Amino acid sequence: MDEERKRRYWQRYQLAKQKGVKFYPDIIFKDLVVAFAIFLLLVGLATFVGVPNEPKADPNDTSYIPRPEWYFLFLFQLLKFFPGKLEWIGTTVVPLLGVLALLLLPLYDKNPYRYWKKRKVAVSLMTVVMLGIVGLTIAAVVTTPPQEEQPALAATLAEKIAVGLDLYSVHCVECHGAEGEGGEIKGVEGLEGVVLDPLNHPDFMYTRTDETILNIINYGQPEHGMPPFGLAYGGELTQSEMEAIVTFMRYTWDDRVELPEEAARVGAIPTLGPDEVPSYEVHVGPIVKRYCVSCHRPGKKNNNYYMRTYEEIMTSGDHAPNVIPGDLNSNLILMLHRQEIEAGGPMPPTKALKPELIEIFERWVAAGAPQTAEEAAALSAPKATETVGATETITPTVTAEATEIVTPTGTVEATATMTSTQPAP
């Protein structure tokens, strides 16, 4: 650059400086206003819109495809050109050369012009860099396989407890019991006759933290015959699933923990009305899931009698059918009454079901083993009249007998006793 050009440049610079806006406080004030506005926008978005949470990170989940954010994808793609021991070139050398190229730009590009058409070296260099970044980003997006969506295991505490109950019923009941009562193990290969302490006792729940229980489930207790359940140790449960089991145990058996109202009904088995017909969908299914599926699934000693679905209950097993609609001498009913028959022994093997649960099975089978609530409701519907043949309708006759009852307070109450008779056809 000759002296005349330097002088003109200096004059233009001084003129622009006199007419321009001062950096302090004018420019700084405007920057602060814009920055504060953006800050408020971000706070509003975070508060009222938010970002959907992905499932908790699980190092044992081999289906997850780790990828950086989109603005780092070009660096991620760049590493594919430097595999193995050459990785340090892509992570250190190439980025360092790029930074140095920008830092040294004033030394090797001394062009005095500001108009972009006259800055060929700088524009060409930046164009190459941007094309490289865009190209690598596109390549990374195209070559990345679609990430399988993994919905959150549970969104609320009640849902988490429900998931934990289902998982506990499948993986834990056959040894620890449906209520965590422990006792002697029966029918489990390698553990026959082993007596387990209860899980639902304060001696266990008070002295184990959630982390301790999670570690026991994850790693197992090989010396005591308990296999590992975590994926990292050869099991089949993810981190979130094991945490759900721990949550179920804590809120169900630790009397120091207050169970939220919305979670109090989790796992409750509906009670039957006096004339209600139970269905598999509403009544029998939840009982089977909680007390039976742990043993009656593939891979267990159960005479191939599986109970995961309605169809399996009705048709599977070496002695099928184990449920005959309308027959209270069906194999399932006899085994629930602790009888030893050819189809199998007492069910459940360690502890009898409560009488009210056995009654649900009996009334279900006696009514024809309906699958859905609609089928059961149709069987429960009262019939005021019955049609015989094509023309004759027989209507029940009803008589009433009035009586008087003296209450403990001395008052007299009138009651009516209704009796119904129906003539024979």
Image (cartoon, rainbow, N blue to C red):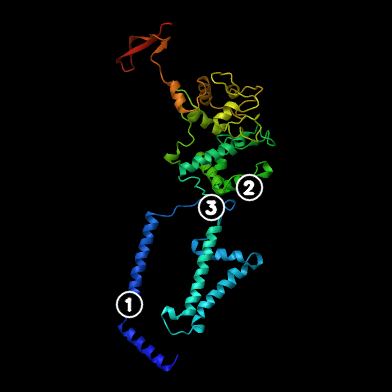
> Which callout, 2 or 3, points to the residue nearer the camera?
3
Q: Is residue 26 visible?
A: yes
**Where does the image place residue 353, in percent across and percent down from the top left?**
56, 27
Q: Amino acid at mark 2?
A: Tyr
Tell me: 305 left or right of 149: right
**Where does the image place residue 413, in percent across and percent down from the top left?**
31, 15
Q: Which residue appears at 40% of the width and 57% of the height?
A: 46
Q: Amino acid at mark 1?
A: Pro
Q: Which residue appears at 37% of the width and 54% of the height?
A: 48
Which of the two labelled residues, at mark 3 and mark 1, occupies the earlier sequence position? Answer: 1
Q: Residue furthest bottom?
A: 3
> Which callout, 1 or 2, points to the residue nearer the camera?
1
Q: Which residue appears at 48% of the width and 45% of the height?
A: 154
Q: Which residue is mark 1?
A: 25
Q: Which residue appears at 59% of the width and 20% of the height?
A: 330
Q: CA distance from mark 1 to mark 2?
A: 63 Å
Q: CA distance from mark 3 to mark 1?
A: 50 Å
The answer to which of 401 and 142 lies nearer the viewer is 142
Which of the two labelled residues, at mark 2 and mark 3, occupies the earlier sequence position? Answer: 3
**Where does the image place residue 109, in percent across and percent down from the top left?**
49, 83
